[in-house]
Image (cartoon, rainbow, N blue to C red):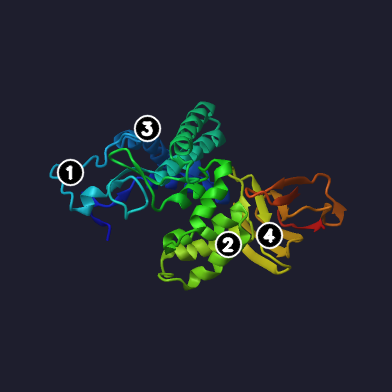
């Protein structure tokens, strides 16, 4: 319904950068190098980072002064959504008059950060440095110019007259990891203080689990299957990611070289996921409460597994032996996390247990 022809369609500028960071995630899960270096993918990344950015005046030095409408048809009709929303500078479509948004800045940060990581994986140090620098510029603009210090929250929209406005968009700042560390909690409180549509809510289980808000994450996870418009595709994907990467904490590192796990479920419930696709095969993960995890490696190679447990632990056992090295840290909210790194050969099952 948002496409009539190649000359009449609705388009959100965030999308290209969102695809870039999603492709890096796909590489991490699958190990398929096409996602980072395949000819079609590489051309898409190059065109996005150069041609697309220039065509829509999205360079760091221009984003705060770009016009509302660009690349419009010769006979521009302000009443025609295919004209006004072809190149909409936000994922939020219910706020008229914006020229830039917090969610687009966050998406550009994530896209260029992903491009930097891809360049590093391909051994291109110069391209990595350039993309990392550009990503940092977008993040700085967002945190230096869009933070409302008086109210302790982010602005979300910039209009043609140069004034800031409030609306949707804050979840994207967290989703794309663009918030300054000391502002993450403020952004979470901002989100929890209002009601959201199902598209936004679908991201909350995985997002809030990662940020250390387990109770809030579980509440959204269990509510989503029954909310209004729960048939929307975002809901099913959001629930799956909320369970796998959120509640069970199964997630590869950005370079795909380490598989992380961490049970974030409350109580001593046993949770299990079997034959989950990873790299060239499958893995199965079982959490026995929050104190023991078992990983079965069904891939063709050794998995470097970082097993984590919420809270402080006296020690960690790998099988029947005490782990040689145990690290202590915290999640973004400051909750204590204890971790150990283990190599799991192909075809083997390893159990790790935290001593409380």
Spatial distance from mark 1 to mark 4, Cα to Cα?
53 Å
Q: Position of residue 339 (x, y in %)?
A: 74, 49
Give the class, few, some or many, for how many residues have Cα within 10 Å of label 1's Cα (few <14, many ≥20).
Answer: few
Q: Please tell me which of labels 3 and 1 falls first in the chain.
A: 3
Work out which quarter of the rendered image holds the C terminus and state it. Answer: bottom right
Classed neighbour count for the residue bearing mark 3: other residues with Cα under 10 Å, few (<14), some (14–19), many (≥20)? some
Q: Is residue 337 left or right of residue 200?
A: right
Instruction: Single out the residue that lies furthest toward the bottom.
Output: 226
Q: Quadrant of residue 233?
A: bottom left
Label pair 3/4, CB-CB below 8 angstroms: no
Judged from this view, the residue extending furthest toward the top is 126
Front of the two marks 3 and 2:
2
Q: Residue at x 67, y 55 (%)?
A: 261
- Label 3 vs label 4: CA separation? 41 Å
The secondary element bearing badge 3 is classed as: loop
Depth check, front residue: 204 or 262: 204
Q: Would residue 45 be found to the left or right of residue 341 on screen?
A: left
Pick whichever, 153 or 248, lies toward us: 153
- Which-is-in-front pick, marks 3 and 1? 3
Give the labeled residue for mark 1: 73
Question: For mark 3, what is the residue?
Answer: 59
């Amino acid at each position: 319904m948002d496409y009539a022809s190649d000359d009449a369609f609705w388009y959100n500028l965030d999308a290209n950068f969102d695809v870039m960071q999603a492709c890096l995630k796909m590489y991490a899960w699958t190990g398929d190098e096409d996602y980072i270096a395949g000819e079609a993918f590489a051309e898409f990344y190059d065109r996005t980072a150069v041609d697309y950015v220039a065509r829509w005046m999205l360079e760091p030095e221009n984003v705060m002064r770009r016009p509302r409408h660009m690349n419009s048809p010769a006979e521009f009709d302000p009443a025609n959504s295919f004209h006004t929303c072809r190149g909409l500078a936000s994922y939020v479509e219910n706020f008229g008059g914006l020229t830039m948004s917090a969610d687009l800045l966050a998406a550009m940060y994530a896209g260029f950060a992903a491009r930097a990581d891809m360049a590093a994986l391909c051994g291109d140090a110069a391209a990595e440095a350039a993309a990392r620098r550009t990503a940092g510029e977008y993040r700085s603009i967002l945190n230096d110019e869009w933070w409302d210090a008086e109210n302790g929250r982010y602005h979300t929209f910039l209009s043609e007259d140069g004034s800031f406005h409030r609306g949707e968009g804050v979840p994207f700042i967290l989703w794309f990891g663009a918030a300054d560390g000391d502002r993450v909690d403020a952004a979470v409180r901002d989100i929890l203080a209002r009601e959201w549509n199902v598209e936004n809510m679908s991201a909350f289980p995985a997002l809030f689990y990662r940020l250390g808000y387990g109770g809030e994450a579980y509440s959204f996870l269990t509510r989503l299957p029954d909310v209004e418009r729960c048939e929307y595709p975002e809901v099913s994907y959001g629930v799956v990611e909320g369970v796998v990467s959120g509640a069970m904490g199964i997630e590869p590192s950005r370079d795909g070289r380490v598989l992380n796990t961490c049970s974030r479920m409350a109580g001593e419930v046993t949770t299990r996921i079997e034959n989950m696709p990873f790299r060239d095969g499958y893995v199965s993960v079982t959490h026995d409460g929050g104190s023991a995890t078992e990983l079965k490696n069904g891939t063709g190679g050794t998995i470097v597994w970082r097993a984590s447990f919420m809270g402080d632990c006296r020690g960690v056992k790998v099988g029947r032996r005490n782990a040689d090295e145990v690290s202590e840290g915290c999640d973004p909210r400051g909750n204590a996390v204890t971790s150990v790194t283990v190599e799991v050969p192909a075809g083997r099952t390893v159990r790790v247990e935290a001593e409380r």
